[in-house]
Image (cartoon, rainbow, N blue to C red):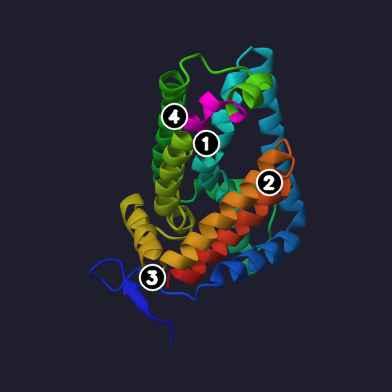
Amino acid sequence: MSETVPVFVEPSPVVRRVPIDRPWHWLAAGWRDLRAASGVAVAYGGMIVLASAVLLFVLVAGGHSALILPLAAGFLLVAPVLAAGLYETSRRLASGQPVSLAAALAGFRANASQIGLIGVLLLIIHLAWMRIAFLLFALLVGDAPPELDRVVTEVLLSARGLPLLVVGTVVGGALAGVTFVVSVISIPMLLDRDINVFAAIATSVVAVRANPVPMALWAAIIVAFTIFGLATLTLGLAIVLPLLGHASWHAYRDLVE
């Protein structure tokens, strides 16, 4: 029988300890849900790709392409909230209810105030990342951020861009880590249960603390898949986001009794 770790003094919620390789089971379960609700996944992923394309067009047309790189790097900070409809789809599949895009989007209304609160928290973290990214560029490079067509030559392949890459990766990774710890369990839990945001975040923190190696592997999988999705000019997100969203639901169900 698996070990359990209580979050509060009360007997519920309770967090399970899971084997190291468990994230691969979550990914496989997410793939099964994606196939079972392929129409919803394609529509949901397509909406994300379309919204990304519109944002890219607006930024480029408005002469703000320098914002594209930090925005893309910060996608991981807001993705957990964007996937709420996918959690709802997996919940419906597990309970034998019909699934549809409308039902998925209605998932945002479940415990809406508490999901909204954590959404605001993640948005604040994302805005903080944007400000920090521009501040680091000013401090370490000394110029205004270059437009997108000069990023490779002036940042990625430049000697003066190396400190920015190192420090930016460390700072961005720290913010992404905080986001992962507070949201990996809390958002699907808020959708599934009548619970407040503080209890949900506490459960998420305890789940990560009780399963450091499996959750580190799960975080690495999420980062790798998301980088792939973004590297394909966001087209890969049409599959990556639904897959990770469904898998995250199974992570929650596996980790919380």
240, 217: nearer the viewer: 217
Quarter in which the C terminus is drawn: bottom left
Marks 3 and 2: CB-CB under 8 Å? no
Residue 253 percent location from the top left of the image? 50, 68
Q: Residue shown at 60%/61% (left/top)?
A: 247
Q: Amino acid at mark 3?
A: Val
Estimate the spatial distance between the alpha carbons at disc 3 and disc 4, rounded to whole Å: 31 Å
Majority secondary structure in the magenta region: helix
Counting residues from the start of the chain, the first of labels 4 and 1 encountered is 1
Question: Residue 154 in the image: x percent, y percent?
Answer: 60, 21
Give the mark nearest the N terminus, 1 or 3. 3
Give how far apart the Cα atoms at labels 4 and 1 are: 9 Å
Q: Are marks 2 and 4 in contact (CB under 8 Å)?
A: no
- Name the residue at the front extreme: 159
| Residue 208 or residue 217, whichever sits in front | 217
Using the rendered view, name the quadrant where residue 138 is placed.
Answer: top left
Q: Badge 1 is on which residue? A: 74
Nearer the viewer's eye, disc 3 or disc 2? 2
Q: What residue did someone put label 2 on?
A: 228
Q: What's under tag 4, amino acid-wise?
A: Leu
Asked if residue 31 can be seen in this view, the reply is: yes
Q: Position of residue 239 (x, y in %)?
A: 72, 50
Locate residue 127: give its quadrant.
Answer: top left
Q: CA distance from mark 1 to mark 2?
A: 15 Å
| For the residues bearing labels 1 and 2, Cβ distance under 8 angstroms | no
The three-letter code of the residue at mark 1 reads Gly
Above/below status of 179 relative to 35 = above
- Tag in front: 1 or 3: 1
Judged from the image, the secondary structure of the residue bearing numbered disc 2 is helix
* Label 1, label 3: how far apart the Cα atoms are: 29 Å
